Image (spheres, rainbow, N blue to C red):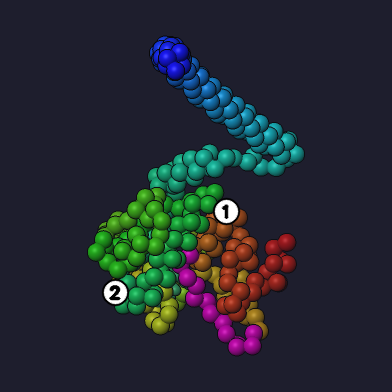
Amino acid sequence: MKRKKMAHSSFENSMNGISEDLDLLHIEVDTDLTENRSDRDDSVCSKNVLRKQRHWEKQLAAKKSKRKEEKQRRKLNRVQSEADGDAPRFTKRVLKAITKERLAEAQSTGRRLCVDLSMTDCMSDKEISRLSGQLRRLYGSNKKASQPFHLFLTNLREDSRLYRECVRMNDGFLNYSMDITEESCLDLFPPETIVYLTPDAEQALQCVDPDKVYVLGGLVDESIQKKLSLGRASELSVLTARLPIDEYMIKKNNSKNFHSKILAINQVFDILLTFCDTGSWTEAFRLWFPLGKGYTVDPDITKSQS
Ligand SMILES: C[S@@+](CC[C@H](N)C(=O)[O-])C[C@H]1O[C@@H](n2cnc3c(N)ncnc32)[C@H](O)[C@@H]1O
């Protein structure tokens, strides 16, 4: 028993010693492990960051070289099509710059055209909205033209329904390359230079004279108000002219027996632009006279011209 107790106590002693040793050992081992783990974590983490960075750099380089290839391919295509005799193709940015320059030049040397907006008070909201759309199209055609006009929107007040509608509906309206003014065409130009275009004029327009100022009546014919622009022209005491439709076109049979020579302002403007480009009314009418108006270019005139 005694021996057993002794043995027990010596066992206890030695166990205590071991446990102390283990404690000591344990602490040291644990510290080492923690340090090692955090070292490893750090290196794993920086390896991940490095890997991601390398991946990102590779992607960036790939994108860069793809862009370069794409640019070279476009350049080659351009050179090729120019060599094939096609007109030179420009990038969007270059085209935009060319248009801007052309419009700026037109504002100092181009043929002049006013849209007289003094008659909008008698128009409905629907007509105002259609007129703002026609002004947008007219401006769009001028932007595309090889010889744009110097455009004026006259008698346009900032507090008018039309002005508000144009700002609301026509993107970039306030930056259009045109003169927008509350003044009338007579405040801007000598009366003898003005030709008011109206479908009811007696005289047909023969050419577009660079020394004259042409005026379109800013009207939309929903509820047709006859001879309004002729009346306005006589109020201003200026010359008038109509498009030479009778001279170059003939009536076309149609089921409704409908024939009209009254066009929207943007349609008249497209005809004028093409006439200025080609010198041919036949060509201008063939391209732009609306099919639904019941007229067609006189084939005899086309024959006599060819
Ligand atoms: C829809 S029209 C207006 C028609 C309106 N009933 C009027 O009193 O003249 C709008 C404008 O386009 C121009 N226009 C339309 N057709 C024309 C034509 N055949 N000849 C000359 N100008 C025309 C005129 O300047 C006219 O004021």
> For ligand 1, which image quadrant applies?
bottom left
Dominant secondary structure, magenta: loop
Q: Can you give x and y, in whole percent of width and height, for residue 24 in the image?
A: 41, 12
Q: Is residue 89 magenta?
A: no
User: Residue shown at 70%/42% (left/top)?
Assistant: 86
SS for dot 2: helix
Q: Mark 2 sits on what residue?
A: 121
Residue located at (60% from left, 87% from top): 257
The picture places residue 106, in percent across and down from the top left corner, at 44, 47
Residue 15 appears in the figure: no
Q: Which residue is mark 1?
A: 277
What stretch of residues is rendered in magenta? 254-266
Q: Nearer the viewer, residue 238 or 127?
A: 127
Q: Look at the image and say whether residue 262 sits in the magenta stretch.
A: yes
Q: Position of residue 133 (x, y in %)?
A: 44, 66
- In the current view of this chain or complex, which residue is farthest to the bottom? 256
**N-term mark: 2 or 1:** 2
